[in-house]
Image: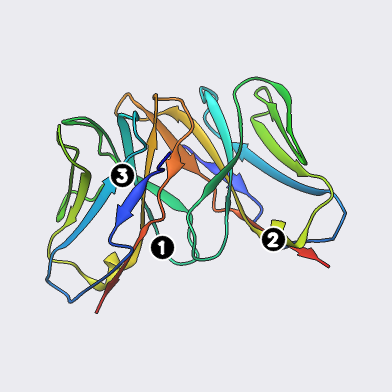
Amino acid sequence: QKEVEQNSGPLSVPEGAIASLNCTYSDRGSQSFFWYRQYSGKSPELIMSIYSNGDKEDGRFTAQLNKASQYVSLLIRDSQPSDSATYLCAVNGRSGAGSYQLTFGKGTKLSVIP
Amino acid sequence: NAGVMQNPRHLVRRRGQEARLRCSPVKGHSHVYWYRQLPEEGLKFMVYLQKENIIDESGMPKERFSAEFPKEGPSILRIQQVVRGDSAAYFCASSEGTLDTQYFGPGTRLTVL
């Protein structure tokens, strides 16, 4: 059973601070990695994708991947109240059926305090 | 540039009825995925389809659930003889390729009375 683990939170940070979200995964053969944001009652929306080891930056967001440690993280700089949401880590790896399957963590709830 | 479209957005069914959920992928995307999200739970993979083919249905219950993605028209997730435990949000996603980013539709919220 492939697993993706995240701290459920809630993670509370003050406005303007850096929020750090972490994720570990069990399938060493995983190929691609994603962070989605989900507001309550809404659908997941893509924040970042990362495919190779290292850092990837996009505006206030930085994704970090360490395949040796099976670890993915998301940093949000200058956090805003509008960043308050649940952040889902998703990992794409081989399924038992031989195709690729996206496995989601349960999400970390982030609260940015004004 | 339309994203993934799902309808209906909300669906209410009585126990024993059939629920039919539709999904139109992003134009040009041939890979479609269905997920279920129970209240306060994570997203669970159900089925992966390409045009006219089911690629992976390992996450879909064997009984009562079926999915299709015909040559023409939207992908359909069908739930027969619904039970209260089927109440959930059902999301469809599409991608250009197998390892590419999956883009999600707005979801269908199914309530079984």
Which residue is label 1 attached to?
B38
Which residue is label 2 attached to?
A84
Q: Which residue type carries mark 3?
A: Gly
Camera-side residue of B74 and A106: B74
Which of the labelled discs sits on residue B87, or is there none? none
Percent x, y for residue B89? Answer: 37, 61
Quadrant placement of the N terminus of chain A: top left
Q: Quadrant of residue B107?
A: bottom left
Q: Chain of mark 2?
A: A
Callouts 3 and 1 in the same chain = yes
Q: Nearer the viewer, mark 2 or mark 3?
A: 2
Whole-Å distance between the Cαs marked 1 and 2?
Answer: 21 Å
Lower position in the chain sequence, tag 3 or tag 1: 1
Which residue is label 3 attached to?
B59
Q: Residues within 10 Å of mark 2 (few under 14, many from 20)?
A: many
Q: Secondary structure at mark 2?
A: loop
Percent x, y for residue B54? Answer: 20, 33
Q: Which residue type carries mark 2?
A: Ser
